[in-house]
Image: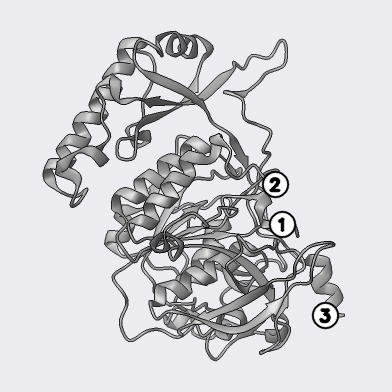
Amino acid sequence: MKNLLRFLVIVFIFISCNPDKTSIKSESVSPGSLEKEVYNVELYFDESSGLVPLKNNPNCKNSLDDKACQIAANELRNSIIEKIRKIDSSIVVDTMHVRVYLDVSVYLDSLNKGQFKKLEAAATANNYVISQTFEIQARRPIMQTDYIQQARRPIMQEQFRYDSLSKTSMMVKEIGGGQPGSSIPTHRVWIVDSGIDSTHQDLNFGQSEAALSSDFSMGNSKNPFEDGYEHGTFLAGAIGGLASSKPIFAEGYGINGVFPLAKMVSIKIFNKSGNTNSGRVTSALSYVFSYAKSGDVVNLSWGLNISSGDCEANQYKKIYEWIDKLASKGVYVVMSAGNEAQESSTNFPGCIDLASQPASTKSKIFTIGSVEVPVSGSYYYSFFSNYGRPSVDYLTPGEDVFTTAPGGKYVLVSGTSVSAAIFSGILYHNSGVGTLAIIKRGAVPGGTNPDYPVAKVGN
């Protein structure tokens, strides 16, 4: 009965989208509609425009925090905004979408047709190209259980895969997580997702991490600590939840993540409807690059279904460049493999092939698949998890993971999203990535059957 129940309610926590939506015009309307067409675009300036990215500025070679570098950054942003205002003063430029380090570019949101046409006509004279954004539509996750109230005394612990003594998921405990460390590392986990409910009793944000958190999602209400889509809160609990010690919560549920009380930063890209686009993602990664330090971890538990062989397509290159730049800075980037039971080459950005990259970059970028753990010590490749080497680097538990949910509640979830979150927690320990086991998935017809390591905390 238990297995039947699990089968009926299994969930794939994976944010995906329609890869065919790549036109510059992001929304269309039917005849007679009162709504207007809107355009979401990016402008990329070449150096003949006189706008030179900060990567070439000697004041920024050592640190982006250098005062002279910050002055140069502000001057460059103001120059971009002034150029656009001269073309059309009605265009609103959000400074958080002006990027000045890797390249000089700007994301412009919700332009009307007249504004777009003016930008198009002025492109050659102002030395920029207009790039189309592609939309990402998230799929709302299905819970394996209804939300569980915190104050409820723990029951059905085996079905929930919950350890009430350690107050952690059995899946987190399996890989060596769930125990508070003697000291908390100074590095951070940047969760680029749907926001995080910071009011949850098990989720804690330091003053510095709260200040760094930022909202790049669609909509006028900007709060990285609101999670209308709920996905980011699931991930945060698995990574760095700390079961509340307050008396009111003592006998109820609680979650200790892979590294309890890990320093986490919420970077929100999805709104409550689960929508975003490549322009917003690029701006978010640019922001993370500006503030992340060597040893930090960036968690990207989402993806885009693409055709096999399209991973290196031009429209994806800017996001890849930021991932590569983060890695070259010493920042770990963790991506989910996807939940379609397909070759991982069909999932962006996790399909990234590192074969031609230097060893220093390869050692910082990971794509994570899911493993089922029916009983401790037994590991089976999850039936839903994408596969293939490259690009899947490690597996971690991704089925029946008990974690935090918005509103002070809990939930049992499955998917490579939570697998990636668990791996981010492993990296945060900064004690190396060990191997619990080496398993195989089973070869596809005519294909190979490679080995996959199941990761754990510590060598």
Residue at 73 percent of width and 81 percent of height: 159
Would you call the spot at circle 2 few (<14 residues within 10 Å), some (14-19), or many (20 or more)? some
Residue 66 visible in rendering: yes
Residue 2 numbered tag:
3
Q: Secondary structure at mark 2?
A: loop
Identified by mark 1, the residue type is: Glu
In space, the residues marked 2 and 1 are separated at their CA atoms by 8 Å
Name the spot of residue 267 as percent of width and height, x first.
43, 51
Residue 343 numbered tag:
1
Q: Earlier in the sequence, mark 2 or mark 1?
A: 2
Residue 308 numbered tag:
2
Which colouring convention does the figure follow? Answer: one colour
**Image position of 156 with respect to 234: above or below:** below
Viewer-nearest residue: 254 or 366: 366
Would you call the spot at circle 3 few (<14 residues within 10 Å), some (14-19), or many (20 or more)? few
Q: Secondary structure at mark 1?
A: loop
Residue 222 visible in rendering: no
Question: Tags 2 and 1 in contact by the CB under 8 Å rule?
Answer: yes
Q: Residue 442 vs residue 333: left or right?
A: right
Of circles 3 and 2, which is in front? 2
Picture quadrant where residue 132 is located: top right
Name the spot of residue 449 as percent of width and height, x first.
74, 70
Residue at 59 percent of width and 68 percent of height: 419
In space, the residues marked 1 and 3 are separated at their CA atoms by 30 Å
**Image position of 167 with respect to 318: above or below:** below
Residue sticking out furthest to the left: 68
